[in-house]
Amino acid sequence: MGLFSRNKPKIKVQTTKKDGYSGWVKCTHCHEMIHANELQQNLHCCPKCNYHYRLSATQRIETLADKDTFVEKFTEFKAADPLNFTDTEAYKERVTKAQASSGRDEAALVGVCKINGVETAVGILDFSFMAGSMGSVVGERLTKVIEFAISEKLPLVIVSSSGGARMQESIFSLMQMAKTSAALAKLHEAKLPYISILTNPTSGGVTASFASLGDVIIAEPNALICFAGPRVVEQVIKQKLPPGAQKSEFLLEKGLIDCIVNRFELKDKVSVFLKFFTGNERSFAEVDASSFPKLSAKLQKLIQLKEPAIWAKS
Ligand SMILES: [Zn+2]
């Protein structure tokens, strides 16, 4: 048979990629090659440099809550467009697109769960939904879950990751700062603990309201935590910021946050704080003022402990 009379070419065209590199990704922080499976098993932290990648609200619940204990609440509040707002795109369309790409109906997921056996009211912001921005639905859901914590006498944990207030809702989004802060003041009056967890990035109106009002403020390593971002600050002051400015480690040194906790230890450490606060039967009002330094020293000790063994489940 002649070469040109063959019906089918003998050379196979490989349509599927079999080069052994599928599933490998380059760490955006240390540029090492890491496998997606390894990243997933490592709670989305780089196994080489410990860079903490963002988690969706669902993944966050999986890492924090005891298995199958989370019950979502206040889903009846849906995104609205009170100002009929359009910039380069109609706000309604942006929301629809965000819902399709994130699989969530809004940027806040709230409810109740158990954290190492402690029943806790939780609120999680999802950065994949319009950069976790706080619109009226986010503010309302968080406020409702804070009020729920008060009525059920539960401790509260909120995990923030947000670009700040949602500008498409203008004053309606800014009002959420006051509303969530007022609800937290009531939680404080009810002597219920609130643990705020700041993840990369937490900024704008979220930093300037409920995220900074925790009785204990925990941050994940290397998280950007700020009001205005570094680029904006540099443009305004026309100076370069010092390296690491507005990152967790810098803010711990300056006293804005209480401790930095690796994602692997986060659940156990949060539950240590929850047990410390909720296990104290005497209310703070009944504690003799002279014992406050002692209480504070104990809390300080809890915050500063770094030995993983100490955080083992009791
Ligand atoms: Zn890395």
Image: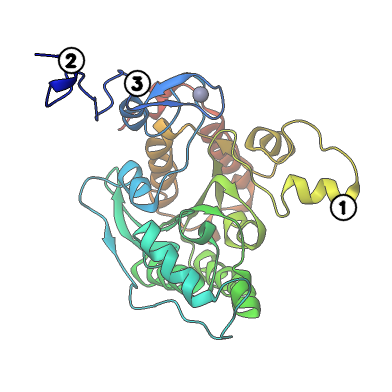
Indicate which label's residue lies in the foreground, 1 or 2. 2
* 313 sits to left or right of 123: left
Task: Please tell me which of labels 3 and 2 falls first in the chain.
Answer: 2
Q: Earlier in the sequence, mark 1 or mark 2?
A: 2
Local SS, label 2: helix
Point out the tag, 1 or 3, that comes first from the N-terminus: 3
Give the x, y percent position of residue 83.
59, 85
Colour pattern: rainbow
Identify which residue is drawn at 60% across, 42% down. Answer: 296
**Which residue is situated farthest in the right direction here?**
238
Which quadrant: the C terminus?
A: top left
Q: Is residue 83 above or below residue 288?
A: below
Residue on which the image places disc 3: 21
The residue pinned by badge 1 equals 236
**Residue 154 seen in this snapshot:** no
Report the amino acid beneath label 2: Leu
Rounded to the nearest angstrom, the CA distance separating label 3 from label 2 is 36 Å
Q: Say whether mark 1 is within 8 Å of ligand 1.
A: no
Q: Is residue 4 visible?
A: yes
Mark 1 is on which residue type? Val
Marks 1 and 3, how far apart at CA:
44 Å
Identify residue for label 2: 3
